[in-house]
Image (cartoon, rainbow, N blue to C red):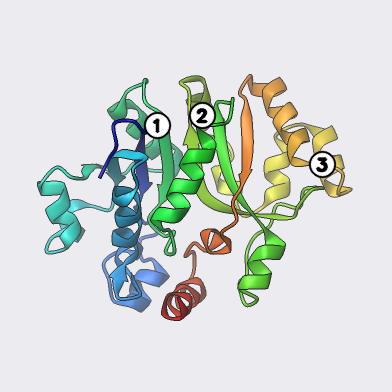
């Protein structure tokens, strides 16, 4: 699977439900959202397959769901055979990431994604990893142009980041290239409840940044400068040419859309 000549990431996959009863899991008749099927496969299996097939991925660390939910699945077999490592999910995504960082150690670049990235593919992983390695920065954040998402998937309903050079959709792909870059997760802990409200995230960069965002004059490079000034962390926004990378499953409607797109592909 791997090539020794290819710089490699350790991958973290967040796969725990945050609700007592997740609506997607309920609609799919599964114990957790990550096991809801798209194209006949659990979303979690789709994500793990995309990562394990990529020459840029050295190892996969799965954070959640509870092990008992994976019994009888091929995913439990991968964990038992140590092809995928598993750790207990924490009370929030940011705490889960910090725990996963501790489990991996400081010296490896890390790719972070989520189990509900139902249309993730080896091609997308390869593109993101190969381009991230060319960035002279600490953290890489994957984005997709909103116009490309709507052109390819007009029925998609996505939260957008309305930057001056956008708008953009996030795609749940993050690369932490240096130990310094991992410190941004502690900052994220204060903001993770606001992820569906982009202007509240921008507010954390200061009132000037927020006003410029509201006026449509804050570009991604402006955010890069503000994060460097505030946190001392070099961030790069990597725009991917894959509209499907922006489709994550947050609702039953998203799940139905992902199933439709999987049938059409």
> Label for residue 98?
1
| Alpha carbon distance from label 3 to label 2 | 24 Å
Residue 26, quarter of picture:
bottom left
* Secondary structure type for disc 2: helix
Name the quadrant containing residue 40.
bottom left
Image disc number at residue 218? 3
In the image, 25: left or right of 159?
Answer: left
Is 19 displayed left or right of 186 in the figure? left
Residue found at x 27% / y 40%: 2
Q: Is tag 3's residue or tag 2's residue first in the polypeptide sequence? A: 2
Identity of the residue drawn at 29% across and 65% down? 35
In the rendered image, the quadrant that contains the C terminus is bottom left
At numbered mark 3, what does the secondary structure look like: helix, strand or loop?
A: loop
**Crowd class of label 2 (few under 14; some 14 to 19; many from 20; radius 10 Å):** few
In the rendering, at what x and y percent does residue 90 appear? 34, 41
Number of residues whose C-alpha sits closer than 10 Å to that of mark 3, classed few (under 14), some (14–19) or many (20 or more): many
> Which residue is identified by label 2?
186
Asked if the residue under mark 1 is in contact with the one under mark 2, i.e. CB atoms within 8 Å, the reply is yes
- The x, y position of residue 210, in whole percent, is 80, 40
């Amino acid at each position: 699977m791997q090539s020794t000549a290819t710089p490699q990431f350790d991958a973290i996959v967040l796969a725990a439900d945050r609700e007592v009863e997740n609506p997607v899991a309920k609609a799919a008749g599964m114990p957790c959202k990550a096991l809801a099927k798209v194209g006949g496969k659990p979303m979690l299996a789709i994500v793990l397959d995309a990562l394990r097939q990529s020459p840029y991925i050295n190892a996969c660390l799965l954070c959640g769901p509870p092990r008992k939910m994976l019994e009888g699945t091929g995913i439990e077999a991968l964990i038992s055979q140590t092809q995928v490592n598993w750790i207990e999910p924490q009370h929030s995504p940011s705490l889960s990431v910090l725990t996963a960082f501790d489990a991996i150690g400081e010296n490896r670049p890390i790719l972070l994604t989520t189990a509900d990235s139902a249309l993730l593919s080896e091609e997308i992983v390869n593109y993101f990893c190969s381009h991230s390695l060319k960035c002279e920065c600490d953290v890489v954040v994957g984005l997709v142009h909103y116009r490309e998402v709507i052109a390819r998937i007009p029925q998609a309903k996505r939260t957008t980041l309305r930057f001056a050079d956008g708008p953009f959709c996030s795609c749940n792909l993050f690369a932490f290239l240096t130990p310094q870059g991992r410190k941004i997760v502690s900052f994220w802990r204060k903001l993770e409840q606001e992820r569906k409200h982009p202007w509240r995230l921008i507010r954390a960069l200061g009132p000037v940044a927020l006003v410029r965002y509201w006026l449509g004059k804050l570009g991604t490079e402006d955010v890069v400068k503000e994060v460097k000034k505030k946190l001392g962390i070099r961030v790069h926004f990597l725009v991917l040419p894959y509209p499907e990378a922006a489709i994550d499953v947050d609702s039953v409607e998203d799940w139905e859309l992902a199933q439709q797109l999987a049938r059409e592909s």
